[in-house]
Amino acid sequence: MNTNLIFKALSNEVRAQILEWLKEPDENFGPQIFLPPDSDFRGGICVGSIQEKAGLAQSVISSYLTLMKNVGLLESKRFGQWTYYRRDEEKIKAFAEYVKTQL
């Protein structure tokens, strides 16, 4: 875990806000109609829903989500043409423990 990269990712207000929204996906986003109901990716939100809520270009949101995935804050899964993202709770927990014990 590269904590410096995680801090950099969270230093952007929109990226931090996306992580907060994904903590309660049912409350912050509408139904994900293209996510198969029998999928093992509960809580996943498609890029379009995140883009709509953030009000930024889809390319910007995609780059933010990719960055957050690469540093370990998010995980993704593709269903057909749709990519869904959700928080990687284990890695977030490890980062929070690092902050708690090391800083």
Image (cartoon, rainbow, N blue to C red):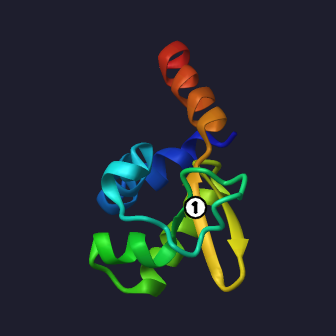
Q: Residue furthest top?
A: 101
Residue 88 in which image quadrant: top right
Point 58% across, 28% down: residue: 93
Left or right: where does residue 75 sit relative to residue 55? right
Which amino acid lies under the numbered mark 1 shown in the image of this protein? Tyr
Q: Is 67 or 46 nearer to us in this picture?
A: 46
Location of residue 19 in the rendering, given as x and y in whole percent from the top left corner: 43, 50
For label 1, the residue is 85
Point 38% across, 76% down: residue: 51
Figure quadrant of the N terminus: top right
Identify whether 21 is placed above or below 62.
Answer: above
Numbered-mark total: 1
Q: Is 81 or 2 nearer to us in this picture?
A: 81
Left or right: where does residue 80 sit relative to residue 44? right
Q: Secondary structure at mark 1?
A: strand
Residue 84 in which image quadrant: bottom right
Identify whether 48 is placed above or below 26.
Answer: below
Q: Residues within 10 Å of mark 1 (few under 14, many from 20)?
A: many
Q: Is 92 or 6 nearer to us in this picture?
A: 92
Location of residue 83 in the rendering, given as x and y in whole percent from the top left corner: 62, 74
Point 70% across, 58% down: residue: 38
Q: Residue furthest front?
A: 37
Point 62% across, 79% down: residue: 82
Identify whether 59 is placed above or below 6.
Answer: below
Left or right: where does residue 15 sit relative to residue 45? left
Location of residue 59 in the rendering, given as x and y in whole percent from the top left corner: 47, 86
Residue 66 in which image quadrant: bottom right
